Amino acid sequence: MNPNSPRTAICPGSYDPVTNGHLDIIGRSAKMFDRVVVGVVNKPMRKSATLFTAEERKSFIEEATADLGNVEVQIFSDLLVRFAREVDATAVIKGLRAISDFEYEFEMAQLNHKLDPGSESVYVFARSHFSFLSSTGVKEMATFNADISDLVPESVAAALVDRLGRR
Ligand code: PNS
């Protein structure tokens, strides 16, 4: 690898929707790499239908990362390792909150390495104040009209209330 070529990382996920915890990982990744591609999965394999479309999820992240010059957002519907090669990524970055994340992420890292032995997974610990935060939790809170204003960007909070909030 040319030491002068820019280093690209991917931050992949469902982001249904993006939370301040995700944005923290993306921002920290943007400090460590020359270019960060946020990959929004358009085909969550084992999961139920998403609340927001891939385009909506992408635009929430674009808006929230507009001040980060080296971050771009792309939708992908392929294997993560193929998408990583497509965008020239040297690393896949994931956030780790608690022990409960470890098992799933360990499996994903092994799977991705099996699919592409050249791929590298990098794990970044979530800051303690985000360690309880998940898209699922935020959706549940929004359903019951709890205050989520410090957990997600403003536009995401509004969209969640609009789609899920009890009237
Ligand atoms: O926990 P998430 O946000 O739903 O994670 C999504 C993703 C793509 C990062 C995770 O499922 C993963 O690492 N998958 C590897 C296997 C793969 O490439 N699957 C196809 C895309 S779902």
Image: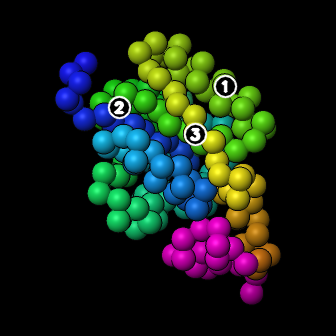
| Disc marking residue 89 | 2
Numbered disc 2: secondary structure: strand
Q: CA distance from mark 3 to mark 2?
A: 17 Å
Mark nearer the N terminus (1 vs 2):
2
Q: Quadrant of residue 51?
A: bottom right
Q: Residues within 10 Å of mark 3 (few under 14, many from 20)?
A: some
Q: Where does residue 56 sit, x and y in percent of width and height?
A: 46, 63
Q: Amino acid at mark 3?
A: Val
Q: Where does residue 98 sit, x and y in percent of width and height?
A: 75, 41
Specify how the rendered protein is coloured.
rainbow
- Labelled pair 1, 2 in contact (Cβ < 8 Å): no
Q: Quadrant of residue 105?
A: top right
* Residue found at the far bottom of this picture: 167
Q: Where does residue 25 sit, x and y in percent of width and height?
A: 53, 49
Q: Quadrant of the N terminus?
A: top left
**Range of magenta residues:** 147-167
Q: What residue sits 49% from the left and 59% below the top?
A: 57
- Judge whether residue 20 is colored magenta: no
Task: Give the residue at mark 1.
Answer: 106
Numbered disc 3: secondary structure: strand
Q: CA distance from mark 3 to mark 1?
A: 13 Å
- Labelled pair 3, 1 in contact (Cβ < 8 Å): no
Numbered disc 1: secondary structure: helix
Q: Amino acid at mark 1?
A: Phe
